[in-house]
Amino acid sequence: MTVCVSPALAELQAAVARFVAADVRDTPEAHRLGEQEVLLGIINQLRAVEVHRLEVIDNDETTVVDTGRATRSWLIEEAQVNPGEATKRVRLARALAAHPLVDDAFSAGNISFEHAWAIITAMRPVPVEFHDIVERALVDAAHACPPYDIGEMIEPLLVACGVESSSDEAHVRRLNRRGLTIARTFDGLRAVSGLLTPDVAEAFETALDVIGQRAGDDDDRTHAQRQHDAVGELAHHYLAHAAIPAVRGERPRVVVTIDYDSLVSRLHDRANQLGESWGHLPSGAVVSPSTARRLACDAEIIPAVLNARGDVLDVAIASRSFPTAVRRAAWLEQKGRCAFPGCRRPPVDCHHIVWWTNGGPSTLENAAWLCAFHHWLVHERGWTMRRDPERGFVFTGPAGQVRPRHPEAA
């Protein structure tokens, strides 16, 4: 579809194309940071233009007329914007007209989209008669602080204006704003956003800092990835140890679905057939074969046979991997440490050294407790492990690197 653009936008496209083609190394080193600051200002201005144009589109219901979608829905379903981000853009577009100082600073490129959003969000509880004073103070402060500091400035401003008699009222208001939202994205991942109270935030950050430490030289995860995996460990630890109802408190369960024809025609190659099948979580999200195998490593496996219409013909009885006695014995054998050499992270999964899908028995000889990272390593990064009478557990990487762990190394 050919889009007819205005002359001004065509000039902007040409200018951006020229700038993209330029090499930063051609700029003298003494000028690079200055140019970078100018570039950030231009980006802020372009974001402001985007929001202003979105305001007109929203007011004129352009997306409703052209696509049959509301503005936010168009951003999500046509422009492929995450739901939370789409909400912020539409709300900012609708609010800027009522905040002229924010609008002016944003349009001049002096503050970012995130600053503008933080100021407008922070000003929601401010009475109308104090809008000008508080807005000016926050815009001035935004020139010298990151967006997340903006919210902390509201409480003393409201107390100074006499709107709140004490910080206790501000605390109650802040507590009422707490919340957490988990939104599903197009690829089955989840986008997390929200506001945590200071005490919950500090406890959460402390836990993530401890759990999310690097697991050794082979841990090439980014900081954000380690934080993500730490959240998973927190959740799995709670599910494994909390006294939650039995219907939700059993071990993870993986249901492998397969059509009847494939089952009877390839029964002799069952392990390979199921081993390369993509998994489906109860929510419908698709996970890779390696991820499915990792999740099923110490879970209950229930084969479900379907007919051509997808109706369930038969569901087998679940069989648990490791008996409780074996899990406890393996824990004592490893002194409560991950089997990987030198790893100090707490173990969370009892792993089949010879995978259960490959015929590995649920015995102590075939059991090894692993932390979440090293469990992921042996399932999804090509590492293998085995027992050695003299060296305990021996791990071998995809490039042939060997990491032995002595039985008493813990």
Image: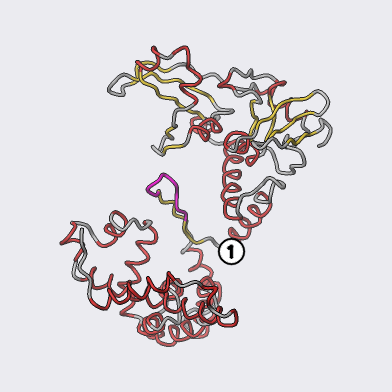
Q: Answer whether residue 71 is visible to the viewer in this image.
A: yes
Q: Residue at x 17, y 60 (%)?
A: 66
- Indicate whether 337 appears above or below 313: below
Mark 1 lies on residue: 198
- Indicate whether 211 appears above or below 153: above
Would you say 88 lies left or right of 317 here?
A: left
Q: Nearer the viewer, residue 279 or 139?
A: 279
> What residue range appears in magenta?
185-192
Residue 407 falls within the magenta-colored stretch: no
What amino acid type is highlighted by mark number 1? Pro
Q: Residue at x 78, y 25 (%)?
A: 388
Would you say 15 lies left or right of 328 here?
A: left
- Indicate whether 140 appears above or below 93: below
Image spot of residue 294 (x, y percent)? 56, 33
The quadrant of the rendering that contains the C terminus is: top right
Total labels drawn: 1
Image spot of residue 234 (x, y percent)? 60, 45
The quadrant of the rendering that contains the N terminus is: bottom left
Would you say 143 lies left or right of 219 here?
A: left
Q: Answer whether residue 125 is visible to the viewer in this image.
A: no
Q: Residues within 10 Å of mark 1 (few under 14, many from 20)?
A: few
Would you say 200 lies left or right of 111 here?
A: right
Q: Quadrant of residue 400?
A: top right
Q: Nearer the viewer, residue 131 or 138?
A: 138
Q: Secondary structure at mark 1?
A: helix
Image spot of residue 312 (x, y percent)? 34, 20
Image spot of residue 99 (x, y percent)? 36, 81
Residue 188 falls within the magenta-colored stretch: yes
Q: How is the image coloured?
A: secondary structure
